[in-house]
Amino acid sequence: MIDISVRDLVKSFDLEKNILDGVSFQIEAGERVGLLGKNGAGKTTLFKILTGELEPSSGEVILASGRRVGLISQIPVYPAGYTVEDVLRSAFERLHRMEREMTELAGRMEGDSEALRRYGELQSRYEGLGGYDMDTQVNKVVNGLSIPESQRNQLFDSLSGGERTRVNLGRLILEDTDILLLDEPTNHLDLHATEWLEEYIAKFRGTVVTISHDRYFLDRTVTRVIELANGRAEFYSGNYSFYAVEKERRYLEQLRRYEKEQAKIQQLEKSAEQLRLWAFMGMDKTYKRAISMERRIERMRTTEKPIRDKKLKQQFASLEFNGDEALVLRSVAKGFGDRTLFSGVEAKVTGGERIALLGDNGTGKSTLIRMLMGEEAPDEGRIRFGPAIRTAYLPQIIEFEHPERSLVNTMLYEKKNMTPQSARNRLAAYDFCGEDVFKSVEVLSGGEKSRLKLCMLMDEEVNFLILDEPTNHLDIASREWIEEAVEAYDGTLLFVSHDRYFIKRFATRIWELSDGVIRDYPMNFAAYRQVKAQEESQKAVEKEPEKKPEKKPNVKKNPSAKRLLTICERDIAKMEERMANLDAEMEVHACDAGKLNELYAEKQQLEEELMALMERWEELAAEAGE
């Protein structure tokens, strides 16, 4: 069954260029599709056309009859006074209507057989749709998305943009939706919530179409990629890792075809030129042959020259660091009102370390970063940088003191020794070209503001780089650029990020901020995830209450069954250990689609064997009288 059918879709906002230019594709029911493309390629425009918010200039969009579509980027306007709890429960409007009708029917059921019949019918449907489990469903989503309990009674209008997105995602998940359209769903989610969303998508029975620049998220959630480029759609039958490899293969294949075609054309052009020369010298017959050959040459021009996306090449200017201590934190504490974010924080950073500061939203990561930069003062304790340290800081929310200024004037005011031409040259190196340099900063997108800020930062010599969510709002090409710049930077790095690709590539040490303290893990991200998995497994064992076996009367004990039971328990423990190792290996090889599929297949086989072994354990336990 086809859920979404798009045919010859064209959309333009001006007469010069079509943002979508003849896009056609189909999405089957239950598919997981990633919609990729550079910022401005038309991804969000396509989503708005699918939901009916925008009309196409031409072409058609057909959604399967009766299928309900939910779009996460579209945050509805709720009535004044709506709390977060009200917004979440608005997902059950259909169930609420049924409740009201059932209440009305209950008052007149006595002696009214029709009302009694209708009530029974409604009650059955209400139960089938999960009406009696609404509280459980809401609590599960709230916990999964890390929406604090204290926030549930807060007015929705008082939330930040990121908090609204998170709550609306929760509402969308609670709705009975058949097609999920997710526009950058992980931008405002921490690691815990992102992983919960990945698990939800894996279990979701409907169709999912995702716009995302989170490569790790795409690898774990999509099985097909549609890329929008130059108004058209390209298709890739795999996750992001497959797409990246296949895109490069197609580029090289087209380049070989183009070069081979051009070599043949040059050879024929040379021959045609010779024939024309002979015709000029009086050999009339060669003129017709030259014309025929030139027509043949034009017919041969079938392959366009492939063009790679322009890559930014700028890097951070590193300053040599001499010394041991780059940063020291002594008994640092910070709180707001009655709430303590953290206290007694002790840490020491040596030169050249690359530290990822991780933790759920609201634990105080950005607050700690602002304290390091002197924008917030600690309530207690001391923060000290080494004497030779020079820092550069990229905040999560990019702000400029004079957003009304143009890009070029912003550069000139910030860099006093820079000429207008050198400012334009530097902006061009960061892909701000032509008339773009005269736009005011306030009209830039979040990604463009990040790029402008980086343009200014990379001009300074630093040896301690502090980044707060550096890849937020950046498309994949820009993320890869900043990763290359960080790779080439040889100073000390401290960063906050929920981008698992970025963390995995750069972190050599993990600071986990939770429960008001920093836990130090002197290891890379993959090793940290293994340690955390073991810690969670241990906690689960400790929390599990000891079950007293029920005495089963009249059960004849089998002495040999007890020995077999011990062997079975040992085999189960080995299998569970292998399952935990497989999960850790899947994290390590998340970027390798082939290896990931191999590990996933092994895990599925192991799960089947484990289920059979558990059934055997129950049988043996009964025989042994356990």
Image (tube, grey):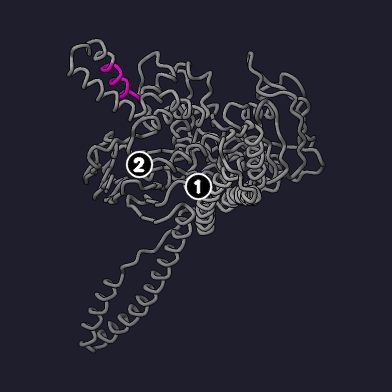
Q: Position of residue 584 (x, y in %)?
A: 61, 48
The residue that mark 2 highlights is: 206
The residue that mark 1 highlights is: 215
User: Regarding mark 2 in the picture, which secondary structure is present there?
Assistant: loop
Q: Are marks 2 and 1 in contact (CB under 8 Å)?
A: no
Drawn side of residue 68 relative to residue 359, left or right: left
Drawn side of residue 245 relative to residue 577, left or right: left
114 or 517: nearer the eye? Answer: 114
Q: Going from the N terminus, do you reach mark 2 or mark 1 first?
A: 2
Q: Amino acid at mark 1?
A: Arg
Q: Position of residue 335 (x, y in %)?
A: 66, 19
Examine the rendering and report whether any part of residue 408 can be seen.
no
The secondary structure that most of the magenta stretch takes on is: helix
Q: Which mark is residue 111?
A: none
Q: Amino acid at mark 2?
A: Gly
| Residue pictured at 68% horizontal, 41% vertical | 493
In the picture shown, does residue 309 fall above or below 441?
A: below
What crowding class fits label 2: few (fewer than 14 Cα within 10 Å), some (14-19), or many (20 or more)? Answer: some
Q: Position of residue 305 (x, y in %)?
A: 39, 64
| Residue pictured at 40% horizontal, 38% vertical | 182
User: Regarding mark 1 in the picture, which secondary structure is present there?
Assistant: helix
In the picture shown, does residue 507 fall above or below 249?
A: above
Image quadrant in which you'd find residue 303: bottom left
Q: Start and end of the magenta stretch?
A: 92-102
Drawn side of residue 476 relative to residue 623, left or right: left
